[in-house]
Image (cartoon, rainbow, N blue to C red):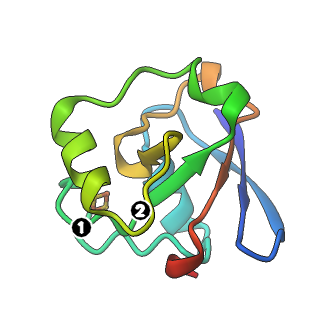
Amino acid sequence: MAKITFIDKDGNQKKIEIENGLTVMEGAVQNNITGIDADCGGSMACATCHVYVQDEWFNKIEKAEDAEQDMIDMAHEPKKNSRLSCQLIVTDQLDGLVVTTPEKQS
Ligand code: FES
């Protein structure tokens, strides 16, 4: 279980608890987080689950694999701290994670 904070483009924050084993995207969808549409259901084909990971967390989590990076490159306004939230699997180690949803997805 991890508490994860989502910040939207206006700076509004929502903190939710997500069970271990789910993805950050799945937790966001279950909790109606604005800006996480997840159109492809987590198959890395849409990039509508794109998030910016807070810098202090970005280097703590596993790096994106090539296929994820390719999809991030096609997302709207990718940044160096971009990740697809459907590829972030929740563990206790993610407790406290903070991500921001891109403006285009809100
Ligand atoms: S849900 Fe489609 S790429 Fe993540």
Total labels: the figure holds 2
x and y percent of residue 52 in the render? 57, 50
Disc 2 residue lies near ligand 1 with CB under 8 A: yes
x and y percent of residue 59 in the render? 57, 20
Q: Is residue 14 left or right of residue 84?
A: right
Q: Decide: is 26 above or below 24.
A: below
- Ligand 1's image quarter is bottom left
Q: In the rendered image, which quarter contains the C terminus?
A: bottom right
Disc 1, SS = loop
Disc 1 residue lies near ligand 1 with CB under 8 A: yes
Q: State how far apart marks 1 and 2 are (Cα).
A: 8 Å
Q: In the rendered image, which quarter contains the N terminus?
A: top right
Quadrant of residue 68 within the rendered picture: top left
x and y percent of residue 100 in the render? 65, 57
Disc 2, SS = loop
- Residue at 82% in and 63% down: 13
* Residue beneath disc 2: 49
* Residue beneath disc 1: 46
Question: Pointers 1 and 2 in contact (CB under 8 A)?
Answer: yes
Q: Decide: is 34 above or below 87.
A: below
Q: Decide: is 52 above or below 34.
A: above
Q: Residues within 10 Å of mark 1 (few under 14, many from 20)?
A: some
- The type of residue carrying mark 1 is Cys
Q: Decide: is 87 above or below 106.
A: above
Q: Find residue 85 and name its label.
A: none
